[in-house]
Image (tube, grey):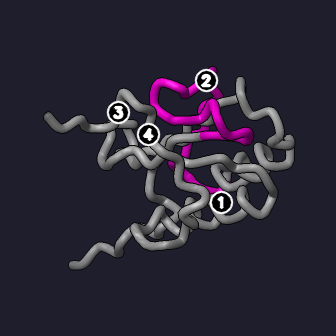
């Protein structure tokens, strides 16, 4: 007996979005991400204060977020992907399509929408 593989949309994840610093990001951007998460049975979106400790976001206006694949019980199962700045509805649509596709490790998310880690998360060499 073979079980069928779960559909990509059922891949659980937690999307954490900074709602403090979005500045130029319009409400349509946030709404598009909310709708995408709502179409993913095990997707959760969390609004939070500044993610400056995780992302290098102070120098660029727009919505910044982090997403992490997880199990249905919310235990992390993959690495955190840093996103932003998400400035336009087209940017939000690209992120939404990536979430709905199951967060593939390909070039679905353009490089311009991949945020840099904060300085304290960058490995230092001696």
* Residue at image coords 71%, 24%: 20
Coordinates of residue 81 in the picture (x, y in percent): 44, 49
- The residue that mark 2 highlights is 50
Measure the C-alpha gap from mark 4 to mark 1.
Answer: 21 Å
| Placement of the C terminus among the 4 image quadrants | top left
Choose the circle earlier in sequence order: 4 or 1: 1
Choose the circle earlier in sequence order: 1 or 3: 1
Q: For the residue labelled by badge 2, is the local secondary structure a helix, a strand or a loop?
A: loop
Question: Which residues lie in the magenta part?
Answer: 39-64
* Residue at image coords 53%, 35%: 56
Q: Which is closer to the viewer, label 2 or label 3?
A: 3
76 left or right of 40 in image: left
Choose the circle earlier in sequence order: 4 or 2: 2
- The residue that mark 4 highlights is 117
Measure the C-alpha gap from mark 3 to mark 4.
Answer: 6 Å
Measure the C-alpha gap from mark 4 to mark 2.
Answer: 13 Å
- The residue that mark 1 highlights is 96
| Placement of the N terminus among the 4 image quadrants | bottom left
Answer whether labels 3 and 4 touch (C-beta < 8 Å).
yes
- Relative to 78, residue 3 above or below: below
- The residue that mark 3 highlights is 121
Nearest the viewer among 124 and 68 is 124
* Residue at image coords 33%, 47%: 79
Q: Which is closer to the viewer, label 4 or label 1?
A: 4
């Amino acid at each position: 007996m073979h079980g069928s593989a779960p559909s990509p949309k059922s891949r659980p994840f937690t999307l954490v979005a900074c709602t403090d610093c979005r500045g130029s990001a319009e409400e349509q951007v946030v709404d598009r991400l909310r709708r995408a998460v709502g179409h993913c049975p095990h997707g959760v979106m969390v609004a939070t204060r500044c993610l400056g400790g995780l992302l290098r976001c102070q120098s660029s206006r727009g919505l910044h977020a982090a997403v992490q694949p997880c199990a249905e019980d919310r235990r992390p199962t993959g690495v955190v992907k840093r996103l932003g700045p998400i400035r336009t509805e087209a940017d939000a649509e690209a992120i939404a399509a990536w979430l709905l596709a199951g967060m593939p490790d390909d070039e679905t998310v353009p490089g311009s929408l991949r945020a840099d880690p904060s300085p304290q998360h960058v490995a230092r060499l001696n």
